[in-house]
């Protein structure tokens, strides 16, 4: 696995829009996507983290975070039902979203952001995402809700040059929106 150097939020490249990736995928893109996924899986392994003090645990990684402004994201986490959420998505686009909002009670974090940014980030509770699934090599549509919806939206934001703390209400960071679901 490649030991990626994570681009930090003070770098201008993290604020740039990424470009679509041409299909069929090159071997280089396939390898990069699989390396990004492997990085996430290892970042959640206690033994690996013990040996690699410079690696922080993460559930999502977007190509701009490793210095490549292309529309490629990797997601890996085990949800509360012990279901493995494992995706490498090329050119992901949100094609529909609910009006109902949700947020993480403890706020969001990011491998590219070292500083704490307290506050709630409201995002649509349900989304539909269209993408090319690199692992299964086919176009897919994902119906996501709750935590998985938040994770994918966070990573898609990276592709647009948006960071999670851009969504925090600057005046009232912990303002509670009526009807929003706390996760």
Image (cartoon, rainbow, N blue to C red):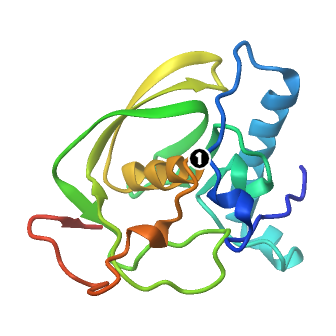
Nearer to me, 81 or 135: 135
Among the 4 quarters of the image, the one containing residue 34: top right
**6 up-or-down from 53: above or below:** above
Tally of numbered discs: 1
Q: The residue tagged with tag 1: helix, strand or loop?
A: helix
Q: In the visual, does 93 lie left or right of 175?
A: right
Instruction: Give the x, y percent position of residue 110.
Output: 59, 69
Label 1: how many residues lie within 10 Å, few (<14), some (14-19) or many (20+)? many
Q: Please tell me which residue is depicted at 76% across the width and 19% down the height of the picture.
A: 25
Q: Please tell me which residue is depicted at 58% across the width and 30% down the height of the picture.
A: 91
Q: In the visual, does 118 lie left or right of 177?
A: right
Instruction: Give the x, y percent position of residue 84.
Output: 52, 45
Nearer to me, 79 or 15: 15
Quadrant of the rendering where the C terminus is positioned? bottom left
Instruction: Give the x, y percent position of residue 99.
Output: 16, 48
Residue at label 1?
159
Among the 4 quarters of the image, the one containing residue 166: bottom left
Q: Please tell me which residue is depicted at 80% across the width and 30% down the height of the picture.
A: 29
Instruction: Give the x, y percent position of residue 20.
Output: 64, 29
**136 up-or-down from 31: above or below:** above
**106 up-or-down from 183: above or below:** below
Q: In the visual, does 37 lie left or right of 108?
A: right
């Amino acid at each position: 696995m490649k030991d990626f150097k994570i681009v930090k939020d003070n770098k201008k490249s993290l604020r740039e829009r990424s470009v679509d990736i041409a299909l069929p995928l090159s071997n280089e893109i396939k390898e990069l996507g699989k390396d990004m996924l492997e990085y996430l899986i290892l970042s959640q392994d206690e033994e690996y983290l013990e040996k690699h003090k410079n690696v922080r645990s993460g559930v999502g990684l977007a190509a701009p975070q490793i210095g490549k402004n292309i529309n490629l994201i990797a997601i890996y986490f085990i949800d509360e039902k012990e279901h493995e959420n494992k995706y490498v998505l090329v050119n992901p686009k949100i094609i529909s979203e609910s009006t109902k909002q949700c947020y993480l009670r403890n706020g969001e974090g990011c491998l590219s952001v070292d500083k704490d940014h307290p506050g709630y980030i409201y995002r649509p509770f349900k989304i539909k995402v269209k993408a090319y699934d690199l692992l299964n090599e086919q176009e897919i549509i994902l119906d996501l809700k709750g935590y998985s919806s938040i994770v994918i939206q966070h990573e898609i934001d990276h592709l647009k040059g948006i960071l999670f703390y851009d969504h925090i209400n600057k005046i009232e960071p912990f303002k509670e929106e009526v009807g929003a679901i706390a996760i």
